[in-house]
Amino acid sequence: MPRKPSKPSPGSASRSTSKRPAADTPNRTSKRARATPRKSYIEPDTDSDAASNAGDLPEDAESGDASDFEAQSEKEVTSESEPDLDVSDGEPPSTKATPRGRQQKKSLPLLKKQSEEKELWKPGAKLEPGMQLIIKKPKARDAGDTPYTESTIHPNTMLFLKEIKANNDRQWLKLHDPDYRIAVLDFNEFIGKLSEKIVEIDETIPELPVKDIVYRIYRDVRFSKDQTPYKTYFSAAWSRTGRKGPYAAYYVQIQPNGGSFVGGGLWQPDTEALRKLRHEIDRKPHKMKQILTDERIRTAFLGGIPDSEKKVVKAFVGLTSNASTALKRHPKDYPIDHKEIDLLRLRSFTLGKRLPDEAIVGSQGMDRIVELISCIEPFITYLNSVVMPDEESSSSSEEDDENDDGSSAADDVDE
């Protein structure tokens, strides 16, 4: 049956030109209630029903105080703090509503490592969905009863060097970075204090920053079969140009288990420097022998041998640092039956002494190193006077080269 129109026909009621008459029952619903969508499409019968429906709205919808900035901030915080959830089954993730109508953030459960599980911080390890891994930031080892001082090597520094020898890989050093930094700082401060002593012993050594004296811990593995990335010792060298250059240098090495070393000299100098040294040995061998027979050098570096030139030369040539690079045969331009052939075969001219750990760690370490540096100073000065002579020493050396017959020794040498 067709629906009757509810609108009256034009002829049934006369059109009024006056204003619309007021309703019999005034509408007392507030503007807030009218502007806000209701939860039901049913018109309220009374004013009390309208008020109750308005009271059911959440507080955020009523206040309208939230700004775009706050909304964006909440969105960014949620996107950063909440992990991606697996929604492959099509079910939305469960959330819990707060009294204000907002979703409550859920913290992810911590993963407790079991004894048989794989180390999760290693590359390739995977976490289960909804799990998070927290690795505590490592802290440096406690100093204990022994304080760190500038003039001593701390026992923790030696302990770190022992550990890196047993764990010589990059991943281990990353996890023990605080111990490494404390050990390096301890060694650098010790070297800075030692530099002040060396400058007083040898006036030709300038005051240089520690970075120009200390060697790095990283190894050069480009042409080595040993691919371990780090050295197992700390070391430093002093010369007129720092740890690098053509001059003879003082050398200090700190290594546990008796590997510490104090010495100096020239290690495999270049061709021109080696030629000058051999020329000096050929013409004036007594100068080097006079230095090597000094009582302090014989006692500190040559095992306390008697004051004999022959025995001193044999001990000096037999040192591992010198013998390992010496020629098997005689050098060019010198006969095999030369009376100083043992010294002429050398390609390195060094002196050194190994020290036990107890001689390095503690207050006595600085004094022992300074004592050895003081003993070797005449040897370093002699080598530098030959290899890189000053103007005054160079002119005096040319005068000494004159033979008894007035001829120059340089005339007999094939340049």
Image: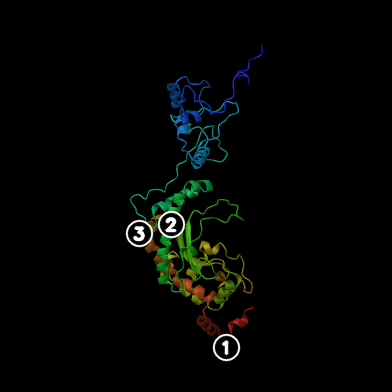
Q: CA distance from mark 3 to mark 2?
A: 17 Å
Q: Position of residue 324 (x, y in %)?
A: 56, 61
Q: Position of residue 211 (x, y in %)?
A: 48, 63
Mark drawn on residue 230: none
Closer to viewer: mark 3 or mark 1:
3
Q: CA distance from mark 2 to mark 1?
A: 59 Å
Residue that carries the numbered disc 1 in the rendered image: 406
Mark 1 element type: loop
Closer to viewer: mark 3 or mark 2:
2
Q: What amino acid does circle 3 point to?
A: Ser
Q: What amino acid does circle 1 point to?
A: Gly
Q: Residue at x 40, y 68 (%)?
A: 196
Locate residue 249 relative to residue 326 in the image: left or right. left
Q: Residue 229: tell me if it is visible.
A: yes
> Which of 19 and 30 lies nearest the eye of the viewer?
19
- Please state, as top left, top right, bottom left or bottom right, where the C terminus lies in the image: bottom right
